Every structure is written in structure tokens, then in C-alpha cells.
Image (tube, rainbow, N blue to C red):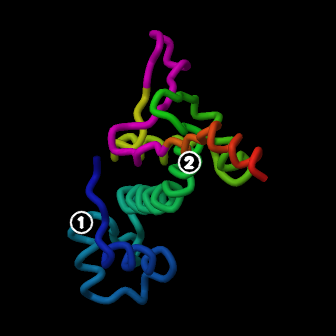
Amino acid sequence: MAKSLSAAQVTALLQATKNSSKLTRLQVFTLATTGLIDVKDDNFVVTGKGQRAMKRQTRRINIEKNVPVVAEAALQILDTNEAMCNHRQIWEAVGRDKFERDEVLDAMRHLREEGILETVKLSGNNFQVFWRRGAAAPEVVAPPEVDEAAEVDAVVKA
């Protein structure tokens, strides 16, 4: 996987895409030595490498924004350690109109890397992948058991 851009590189690349004539010498040096900008017809232009780096950075930011929402929905659906679901159930829980399928899957993969979710293949079919709670997921709290005998005594005494 490619290296992440530093905050200075992101700022400089954003400036280069908007108005490259306002880049400082340090920004030009930083971007040029990493191959993110080049000179073409006496102007600075963002290279293909720079464009791909910005797309990766944008994708990373979107994943970080989506992970808490997807985690909450997934852990709500997967309310027991044995419960399993497919990605569509989680996608519908977070809102199919609010999130793209790939955004939800990317967030779920990120949660899998953290150990909060894990995947289970019940067959050799890649379309039958199920998700369940991982080892790092918060513990499932069982609802408190109601003592029926105490409840009956309270009703009789009233």
C-alpha cells in the first residue's frame, strides 16, 4: 500500500490543484521531490501520482468518517456473539440512500482489520460471505433476567 501523505503535502497538493502559481518554494520542493508535481509549459501541474495520492487521501478521510456509523449499526444488528449477517443488512441499517455500497464495505473492512468484525465463509462461494462480531468488539451485555416469582408476589400483594 502507498504511503500516506503528510498534512503539509496535502495542503500543498490542494493549493497546486487550485492555483499552482501561489505555491511556496518549500511546497514546490516537497511536491517535486516526491514526484507529485511536474513542470509543463512553464507551469506546475499535478502528476498522475499526485492525483492518485489525493484520491487515496479523500477515500481515507471518508472511511474514517463512515466507520463510527457503520460500527454502531453492525454491532446493533450483531447483538449476540453467534449472530451473523451479510453486508446488505448493515448497508440498509445505515441507509442505502445515505451511503454507497462500497463506502459501507470499506468501513466494514476497516472494522475487520481492527478486530471488531470478522468474516465467515460458509461455502466456497464468494457471494456468501457473512459478518459477525470479532474478538475486539465490545462485550455483549445480556438483558437482566426478571424473576417471575418476585413479580407475581408484587402483583398479589398489591
Question: Horizontal and vertical percent for residue 151?
Answer: 68, 44
Quarter location, residue 113: top left
Question: In this view of the protein, which residue sits in the foreground, 102 or 54?
Answer: 102
Left or right: where 4 falls relative to 45? left
Q: Earlier in the sequence, mark 1 or mark 2?
A: 1
- Magenta region, residue range: 120-141
Q: Residue at x 48, y 43 (%)?
A: 108
Q: Is residue 104 above or below residue 84?
A: below
Near mark 1 (Cα within 10 A), the count class, few <14, some 14-19 or many ≥20, is few
Tell which residue pokes out farthest to the front in this image. Answer: 157
Q: Which residue is mark 1?
A: 34
Please tell me whether mark 2 sits on a helix, a strand or a loop: helix
Q: Residue at x 51, y 26 (%)?
A: 130
User: What residue type is disc 2 on?
Assistant: Glu
Determine the main secondary structure of the stretch shown in magenta: loop
Is-magenta flag for residue 125? yes
Question: Horizontal and vertical percent for residue 28?
Answer: 29, 80
Left or right: where 95 falls relative to 86? right
Question: Horizontal and vertical percent for residue 106?
Answer: 48, 45
Question: In this view of the protein, which residue sits in the foreground, 30 or 115?
Answer: 115
Tell which residue pokes out farthest to the left in this image. Answer: 33
Q: Is residue 91 above or below residue 18?
A: above
Quarter location, residue 50: bottom left
Quarter location, residue 91: top right
Near mark 2 (Cα within 10 A), the count class, few <14, some 14-19 or many ≥20, is some
Q: Which residue is mark 2?
A: 103
Q: Residue at x 54, y 18 (%)?
A: 128
Q: Nearer the viewer, mark 1 or mark 2?
A: 2
